[in-house]
Amino acid sequence: MTNQLDTLDNMVSQGLADSARRTPEGIRELIGSLRQAPLIFKDVTDDDAEFLAREIEERIGVSMGLGSVVDSEDFEQWLESVRPEIESGSDPWYYWTRYKKLLFKKKLPQDVIYGTDQVTDTILGRLGNPHDKRTWDRKGMVVGHVQSGKTANYTGLACKAADVGYRLIIVIAGLHNNLRNQTQGRIDEGFIGRDTSRLAQMGTRERPKLIGVAEFDDRFTPVSLTNTIRDFNKATATSNTSQIASYAVPVVLVIKKNMHTLRNLTEWLREHSANHSSEMVDQPMLLIDDEADNASINVKYGKNEVSRINGQIRELLGLFRRSCYVGYTATPFANIFIDPEQDEEMEAEDLFPRDFIIGLDAPGNYFGPRKVFLDGMPDEEEPLYLRNIIDNEDVLPIRHKKDDELVSVPSSMIEALRAFLVARTIRDLRGQRHQHASMLVNASRFTRIQGLIRNRLQEVLDTIRDSIRVNASLGERGIRDPEIAALRDIWAAEFYEAWSDWSEIQAQMLNSIGAAKVVEVNSRVNDLDYSAAGERGLSVIAVGGFSLSRGLTLEGLTVSYFLRNSMMYDTLMQMGRWFGYRGNYEDLCRIWMPPQATAWYAHIAEATEELHEELRRMQRDRATPLQFGLAVRSHPSSLLVTARNKLGSGEKHVRIGLSNGYVETYKLSNVPDVLEGNMSAARDFVTALREDGHEPGDAKLEKGGYLLRGIDVAHVDDFLLRFRNARECVGTTIDPLRRYIDQRAHDELGKWDVFFASVSENEETSDVLGWPIGPARRSIGPDKLEDGILAISGQRARVASRGVEKIGVAPENVALAEADFMSAHRLEKSGKINFPDYIYRRVRKRPLLVLFLLSVRLPEKTEARERFERLLPKEPVVAFGISFPVSSRPDEKVEYVMNTTMLRELFGEEDLDEDAEMEDV
């Protein structure tokens, strides 16, 4: 029946190319008319037809914007001038046309395919013109989103580059064989049209297996000097060709990001260039660097040193008279920090994207950081997708050694496994039996421990499966089995609204999970092979580390279990394999992670959104890549990246701009004298304001709290001078804050809005500041209490609630900011929209100081509760936040001084896996 439904889907999709029929009624009418052929669709039921109609409706409703473009000042458009010549040829856009047909066959939303066409044109037009015989080199960066389809984008770019005349295309994929092999497979399907693994093994008389794009046209097949079995090899390449120029079709290589591979390729190209007397290869070359922030950037800090891979990429580019480097990344902070110590050195740095930066918009159906960590985490409510890991320390502590034993796994990991099995079953009941379903487990950096986790989970899976095999068919009596009862409990807690009939799930479960397996994926072993599936999709639990964190795609990822301690911006985002596309099962997705990781992801999600907004703004302002780079480097979040890149010895001086920034005291000292001193500073601040004529009755807001306008900067400075900041809260280090304010005290920061936050529904009103204020309740992470630190935890590790930076902004500016945001994200006014605070910051005219009284408590389910409760302060504590407007002098920055010990305390040790080391050839 699956084949019949697929055939019907293909026919309907083709029939809907006419946009006039793309309505709910038109879709169902077309499905109904096609079902009149009973011999073809005799097994398609009315329920199947309705399921298909809804799936097609969802696909049609998905669109993708064109993103943002920031160009250098010397950009010259060339593509449009050669387009007439290309389109008048016998096979115009040959490679792109094949690929576009493949995307339609894969049922990508039509508007997304059209969007990809326009975006790849935009990128292509910023590469060098391959018919320009002068010497040139171009460097650019494409900023996407984790797991949002970057591979599909650069495959389309490779196709179009071949169409306009590029004859050598090199794709640098992951650090490991499994990542490179996966990328090679996608290039095989989307550009080459041959199964290169078969080409590597077949005899001379065998006909190559056509795949992907070759099913539409296989006349001009590109030559691949690599295959899905083996990376670049000089001997194999030499047996294929003597010169790159000898081919009339494009030559493509997909290579591992490895120093030896890059060196071998450079030597081979030098030996086999068309002009042996010249060190420069004459063919135009496009180099696509996937995950460009990983190992490509310069991470050595000796005066003239560069990282080994960075140096090899530079040498490879330098071999060509005409070359173009395009780095694809979802974590551009790291790319901007390719280490020029001074801003003016940044543009001259080796792989800095000096010519163009393009931001890709994610399609509307993207399951990304905003949906999970911002929209999915309402203030003080249960998160939609996230679940906390708080039970691991006795069994599998975050800090463990490679030789530790593992006799069991945390109960939360078993809970996550049960959730995956139930979700897989519900997906089958929804008609997704033929689709893959995966669970990710990333809980150790050591391959040996990963193997032990795999063994323990296999034991648990076998026990669950045995119970289902014996007792699931017993109906209500089957619930007496404790394993089935535990599965039912997880269904009731997580998935009741997704599928309300447990009896149907229980009856289906053996069929759904009977072939489920636990596999290990790392540099030592890779048992993950989706190609081995038949008509039924695979159900796999993938256990690994670094390989699961970078590039490798888990098909149908539904449940993730993430137990890592990295707080580095780029590392965390790349570990987010749970982002992507979850057609008709997004509501079943769940992610288990420690509370502190949840908080960091929320912070990073917001910082990433701000960065994309900055790209849009700079496009409007016709800014250059250098100006964008300067803005990124001065962003407060750059503290995280700088911390990682500069871990060494001695003090580190980091220059940060606070223009358009928000800082707050999310960590507070728990020393009684400090808490009382901060309270005294707040009382005296209130007293000074009252002496200036400000009274609470005059400033009461409807939502609770007191907004005072036009407060003199001297009062704010006095408060900050007396406030004793926790060393661990770097962003609110008092001296840099006061220096930044003092530099602007005579003009743009001379007058302030001050808001005293008060929770009106809190009955415990406090008069400790002289005004009646309802303290906000905040959870405190127990792990730092014994170190004398009150670390705000909870879902977002934020002192302020969402929307606080809207306070004090004129209504017309609020409306303007929200309209711009909706337009940029293609949002409609219907329904609730969670507007991010940074949009109000950009239209703010005066700085905002927010003072909080916090009533602190431990999170629910805290282990050893009595031990930690005695350490909590009994009275409310003072915290503050500052929202800075856009400065007219954003380049004037202040210096933060941090030593190595502080950096490690703040951001953890470097959390690299054993298999993060680069493999040898």
Image (cartoon, grey):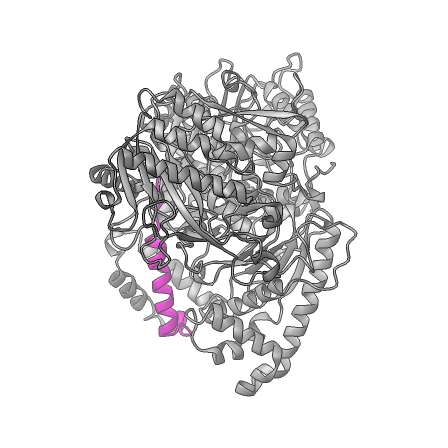
**x, y percentage for residue 894?**
47, 23
Q: Nearer the viewer, residue 442 or 907?
A: 907
Q: Is residue 269 left or right of residue 709?
A: right
Percent position (x, y) of residue 908? 63, 41
- State left or right for residue 666 relative to residue 264: left
Looking at the picture, how far across and down is residue 157, in whole percent? 47, 35
Q: Residue at horizontal 59%, vertical 22%?
A: 317
Q: Is residue 193 visible?
A: no
Query: Residue 50 falls in which quadrant of the image?
Result: bottom left
Q: Position of residue 162 (x, y in %)?
A: 49, 31
Q: Is residue 793 above or below residue 163?
A: below
From the viewer's side, name the closer residue of 776 and 201: 776
Chief secondary structure of the magenta span? Answer: helix
Q: Is residue 87 left or right of residue 510?
A: left
* The one of 447 and 806 positioned closer to us in this rendering: 806
Q: Is residue 769 left or right of residue 536?
A: left
Q: Which residues are magenta?
A: 39-66
Does any portion of residue 574 appear in the rendered image? yes
- Residue 42 located within the stretch drawn in magenta: yes
- So how many labels did they put on this image? 0
Query: Which of the two residues, 534 or 563, is positioned nearer the viewer here?
Result: 563
Give the residue displayed 31% in from the left and 21% down from the top. Answer: 747
